[in-house]
């Protein structure tokens, strides 16, 4: 399993807009309609990456813990589904249901959205404030497959809690690490 670090988009960057298909309900969804009242967490994930599989239950729990607090979660897969069919839309929908993802799981077929966010790996996380300005980009926590550190979501949770409490988000952020996005 190849390890790729996230590119760390500069803090303060405005979230690139998108309009993508939700693989569960087959409707188009835009960032402007999905954004939260307090913040928005955009996650680049996929179905087959061991790093994403390792944290999938925490991704589900994050949404359950924070949507009611005004932070909406959005997952996007940008992987090449022709060469990685397990990451195609029908498998994304099945994966979302099996993992109890209560957030939209969107398909970026052209990979334009991943490029706009400078996403590099799965998982790759981008937390935006109410004005869609980037306040956090980095890892979920220190856990990785095989390192025996429990998955807690500590780093993302600290950033989300700071947003909710109208406190500054710690600018010292560690890159996420995972499988590289499978580019076309």
Image: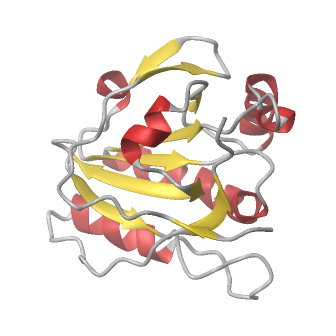
Residue 116 position in % (x across, y down): 38, 39
Marker count (numbered): 0
Q: Can I make out residue 114 in this image?
A: yes
In this rendering, position of residue 37 left or right of residue 81: left
Q: Horizontally, is 24 left or right of 134 in the view?
A: right
Residue 88, percent from left and from top: 77, 29
Q: Quadrant of the N terminus?
A: bottom right
In x, y percent, where is residue 84? 82, 38
For the C terminus, the quadrant is: top right
Residue 18 falls in which quadrant of the image?
A: top left
Task: Please identify the residue farthest to the top as the structure is shown.
Answer: 27
Q: Which residue is depicted at the point 80% across and 28% down?
A: 82
Q: Position of residue 109 (x, y in %)?
A: 61, 25
Picture layout, residue 55 above or below residue 182: below
125 lies left or right of 47: left
Which residue is at 65% across, 65% downward? 178
Relative height, residue 87 to residue 45 (above, below): above
Quarter assignment of residue 34: top left
Q: Residue furthest front?
A: 184
Residue closer to the observer: 120 or 125 = 120
Q: Quadrant of residue 174?
A: bottom left
């Amino acid at each position: 399993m190849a390890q790729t670090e996230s590119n760390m988009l500069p803090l303060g960057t405005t979230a690139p807009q998108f309009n993508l298909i939700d693989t569960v309900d087959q409707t188009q969804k835009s960032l402007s309609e999905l954004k939260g009242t307090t913040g928005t967490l955009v996650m680049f994930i996929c179905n087959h990456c061991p790093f994403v599989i390792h944290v999938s239950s925490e991704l589900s729990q994050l949404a359950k813990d924070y949507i009611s607090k005004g932070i909406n979660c959005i997952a996007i897969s940008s992987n090449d589904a022709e060469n990685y069919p397990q990451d195609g839309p029908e498998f994304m929908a099945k994966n979302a249901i099996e993992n109890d993802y209560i957030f939209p799981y969107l398909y970026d077929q052209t990979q334009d959205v991943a490029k706009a966010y400078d996403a590099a790996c799965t998982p790759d996380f981008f937390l935006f404030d109410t004005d869609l300005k980037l306040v956090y980009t980095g890892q979920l926590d220190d856990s990785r497959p095989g390192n025996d550190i429990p998955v807690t979501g500590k780093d993302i949770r600290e950033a989300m809690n700071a947003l909710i409490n109208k406190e500054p988000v710690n600018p010292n952020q560690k890159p996420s690490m995972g499988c590289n996005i499978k580019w076309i």
